[in-house]
Structures are given as structure tokens and as C-alpha cells.
Amino acid sequence: MLRTPTARVLDEADEPAVLRLLAGDPVGACVLAGRIESAGTAPASLGAPLWGIGTGRGLDAVCLAGANLIPFAAPGAERPAAIAFAERARRAGRRCSTIVGPAASVQPLWELLAPHWGPPRDHRPRQPLMAIDGPPAVPPEPRVRPVRTSEVETLLPAAVAMFTEEVGVSPLRADGGAGYRARVAELVRAGQSLAWIENGQVLFKAEIGAVSRAVCQVQGVWVAPAQRGRGIGTAGTAAVVEYARSAIAPVVSLYVNDFNAPARAAYARVGFREVGRYASVLF
């Protein structure tokens, strides 16, 4: 471990070392691993700089500095990494809408950035990270299926409602919602958006928002308000797990707010177990 680490912008030559680092925690690193497996580590192809500390074959930590600031550090490297990444982030100024990732990496980074970037709109320091690597423990809802490209407009209001309920602001507030609409359509085209749609209404929806070779991460789980309390979320999530494990990756993960007791209980019934902790800082 470097005593006084300095973060540098990584390039394509660093890709093997980055993947070795992320392989130490495939579930916690799913979002980063998926991006790097598909785009590499060169800033031009990745779409944002990837900072790292360490040299040669050994990297101790990385941080993707894009629309989301996503740090990931090896155990024991979290504090030195936070110091190095906070220095670069302060110099660059806040350009992200969220800091998110494993809590052990996010928390020390946010402590250093808070005097410069705070106060945030929301801070969620304890978000259980859960995973399942076998069949769901409850029967899946058979009417949950991949959304068709012709159904994007049907899906969009439910996606907006989920985002607004979860994040606290509408995704349509920026650029008239064009960016969010494009993201919803992209997931549909990729076969990573699933829903139960009946008579033109979405009763349940979820996305597989991040995909690596080893793990995928479920995001955006939502049940129509009038349908809640009937087990739809549990059976729907079981269907997502069944589909994801057969078509996308062998391990399915998600993270959930610690205060959302009903969701945590539903995921536990499906067979998810807690394997770590995430943290999010929302601006």
C-alpha cells in the first residue's frame, strides 16, 4: 500500500489490473466490472475517467468519475484511496449526481468531500447488498416477462413513478426526460427490462441495470400502488431472478434501503442473502 497515494487516470494498459482488483468482490464491484468488461479502461471508450491508485500489476483502488462517482477499494485500502480520490474530485469540482458503491469505500470519500460538496439532497449510508446464486425460494410470477420494444411508452410512466418514489425527484426534470427515456429504451432493447403488463397497465417492473460476466444487479423494482401488499413484488422478483440466472449471469444481486423493511423481507423470502453493504450520497 502506498503511504501517500496519488490517483492517476488509468488507460487501456491498466485493464488487466483493474479486473483483478474487481474480481476480489464480484457482487460489490458488479457495476464497475460490467462497464469495464464492455468498454475497457481507456477514458474515450469508457466515457469518463477511471482513477486508480497503485502501480504495475497491483491496483489498490479505482474510482469511475462519471455521472455517478463510483469508488471501489481493496480491504484496508479504503482510507488512502478516499484521500487520493477526494483530492482529484475537489480539483475537478462536482460533476456527478450520486456517489454510490460499497459503503467501506463511499463513506470515507464522502467524509472528505462533504465540507466542499455538501449538503447532499439525501445520504443513505446503510443499504444492504444482497445476492442469490440459486433458484428462487418462492414460485415466480409467470406473467413477468421481458418488455417488448413496442411497449416502451407503456412502461415509461411506471419507470418515472419508481424513480421519483425512490430518489425523491423526477427523472424528467432534466433535458425534458430525453436522457431517462433513452435509458429505459436501451434496457428494453437489451432484454434487461421485465414487467407484468395487463390491459395496458404495468403491475410490476424491474430492470437488470448492471451486468458483468459473473454477476448482474437488479434495479428499479416497483409494484403499482394499488397492487401492493398482495405478494406481487415477491413473486415478480422471483421471476426476475429466474430469468436473469438463465439468460444473463449466474449470480443476481441488488441493494435496498435499510429502512425499507417490507422490501428487505420480500427479497429474503425470494432467497436473497445479505453479502455486504452499499452507501449512496444523492445531490
Image (cartoon, rainbow, N blue to C red):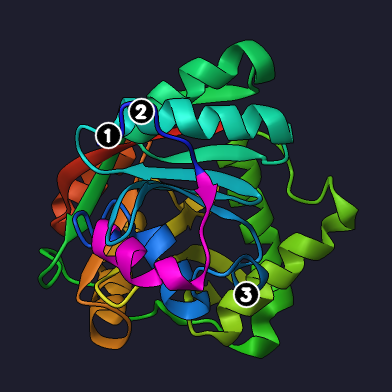
Image quarter hosting the N terminus = top left
The region drawn magenta spans 8-21
Where's residue 129, x and y in %?
27, 44
Q: Which mark is residue 45?
A: 3
- Lower position in the chain sequence, tag 3 or tag 1: 3
Say whether residue 260 is visible. Answer: no
Would you say residue 17 sits in the magenta stretch? yes
Q: Quadrant of residue 200?
A: bottom right
Q: Residues within 10 Å of mark 1 (few under 14, many from 20)?
A: some
Mark pair 1, 2: CA separation = 6 Å
Q: Earlier in the sequence, mark 2 or mark 3?
A: 3
Q: Which amino acid type corresponds to the residue marked 2 in the rendered image?
A: Pro
Q: Is residue 65 magenta?
A: no
Above-or-below relation of 66 to 44? above
Question: Label 1 amino acid?
Answer: Ala
The answer to whether the residue labelled 1 contacts the one labelled 2, judged by CB atoms less than 8 Å apart, is: yes
Task: Confirm or deny contact between disc 3 and disc 1 (CB under 8 A).
Answer: no
Q: Residue furthest right?
A: 176
Q: CA distance from mark 3 to mark 1?
A: 27 Å
Q: Which residue is mark 2?
A: 80
Q: State the residue at coordinates (25%, 64%).
A: 20
Q: Amino acid at mark 3?
A: Ser
User: 236 or 37: which is nearer to us?
Assistant: 37
Q: Find residue 148 and report its image quarter.
A: bottom right
Relative to the observer, which residue lies in front, 186 or 235?
A: 186
- Identify residue for label 1: 77
Q: Is residue 195 left or right of residue 255?
A: right
